[in-house]
Amino acid sequence: MSLAVIKTGGKQYKVSKDLLLKVEKLPGNVGDKIEFDQVLLVSDDKGAKLELGQPFLKDKKIEAEIIEQGRAKKINVVKYKRKTRYRRKFGHRQAFTQVKFAKV
């Protein structure tokens, strides 16, 4: 198995072995092993063998290791309405977890 599609944080990701990926924040500490059990698709090296879930594959888990827990760069959100003296500005930093896929 060299390619898989997993679902986490409401998004779908195409993953392979030794891939570093930032996903929505997951519980755990740096160095912990985690398993993704919502696997949508698994394929081998050449694409000859393809397993497709309905919607998920049963008994398939993708293992990963937590590399970093952090927060992304700050984005500024501005609300403005002309002629009414209405202005609001605030920032947001999204929390993320960086994982490295060990076995796909």
Image: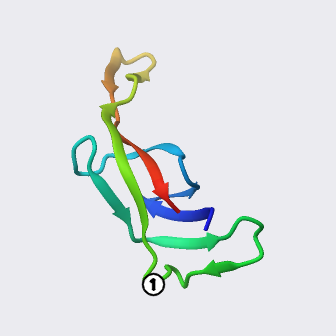
The residue that disc 1 covers is 58
Q: Tell me which amino acid carries mark 1.
A: Lys
Residue for point 35% across, 18% down: 87
Q: Residues within 10 Å of mark 1 (few under 14, many from 20)?
A: few
Depth check: 35 or 9 in front?
35
Q: Is residue 45 above or below residue 98?
A: below
Query: Could you say where residue 1 lies in the image, as x and y percent from the top left?
Result: 61, 68
Q: Residue at x 63, y 80 (%)?
A: 51
Q: Position of residue 50 (x, y in %)?
A: 69, 78
Residue 93 in picture, x, y percent from top left? 33, 29
Q: Position of residue 78 (x, y in %)?
A: 40, 22
Q: Quadrant of residue 85?
A: top left
- Say if residue 2 shows up in the picture: yes
Say which residue appears at 49% left-offset and 79% top-offset.
56
Q: From the viewer's perspective, tell me whether residue 38 is left or right of residue 43.
A: left
Q: Nearer the viewer, residue 103 or 81?
A: 103
| Above or below 87: residue 96 | below
